[in-house]
Image: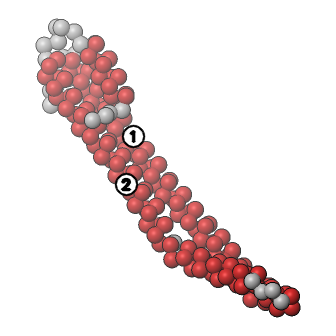
Amino acid sequence: MKFPILTLFLTFVLLNQTTETSGNSKQCFSLYLTQLEKLGTDWLAGYKNCLDSATIGRESLLTNVSSVQKAIRKSALDIEAFIQSCLAINDALEFFDCFAKLSTQEMATAYGISYNASEEALVLNKQLSNIEVEHYQCTNRTENDYVLGTAQVFQALDDCLEGSGLLH
C-alpha cells in the first residue's frame, strides 16, 4: 500500500525522536501506526471513489450525446451524398442546377448542423467542466481529511512517546 510521502516522512522523524527510555514506545507505535494505516487506506479508497465518480459521469455524458452525434453525422453524410451526386453529373446544365439546389436545400441543413453542434458542444463542455470541479473538490476533501487526520494521530503519537498522552 502506498501512502503519501508526508506520512512516511513524519513517521521517520518520530522514530528518530524516540529515545530508549520511552518504556511504552512499542505500544505507542503499535496503536498509532495502525491508525495511520487506516487513514491511508481511507484516503486511497476516497481518492478512488472520486476518480470513479468522475469517470462514470464523463462516460454517462458521452453516452447521452451519442444519439445527437449520430443524427448530426447522418445529416452531414446526406449533404455529402448530395454533393457527390452533383459532382458525378457530366451535363453542364444539370451540374449547375444540382449545385443551385444545394444552396437552397442543403445549406439550411448545414446551418442546422452547425447550430446543433455548437449548442451541444457548449452544453457538453459545461457539463464536463462541472464534473472536473466536482472531482477536484472531492479529491481536495479527501486529501484534507487525510492531512488533518494524520496530524492528529502524529500529535497523539508524539504525546504518547513523551509519556504525556494516554494510550487509547
Residue at x 50%, y 72% (from the top left corner): 66
In the picture shown, does residue 114 fall above or below 3?
below
Residue under label 2:
52
Can the viewer see residue 39 in this picture? no
93 shown above or below 27: below
SS for dot 2: helix
Estimate the x, y position of residue 93 in percent, counting from the top left.
86, 91
Q: Nearer the viewer, mark 2 or mark 1?
A: 2
Q: What residue lies at 26% left-to-right and 40% top-to-bottom? A: 41
Of the numbered discs 2 and 1, the one sitting upstream in the chain is 2
Farthest-out residue, front:
90
Question: Which quarter of the rendering shows the N terminus?
Answer: top left
Nearer the observer, 152 or 88: 88
Which residue appears at 17% of the width and 17% of the height? 25
Residue 6, picture quadrant: top left
Looking at the image, the residue that sits furthest to the right is: 93
Which quarter of the rendering shows the C terminus? top left
Identify the amino acid type marked 2: Asp
Instruction: Please determine whether, in this image, residue 134 is positioned above or below residue 47.
Output: below
Q: Which residue is mark 1?
A: 144
Identity of the amino acid at label 1? Asn
Instruction: Name the secondary structure under disc 1.
Output: helix
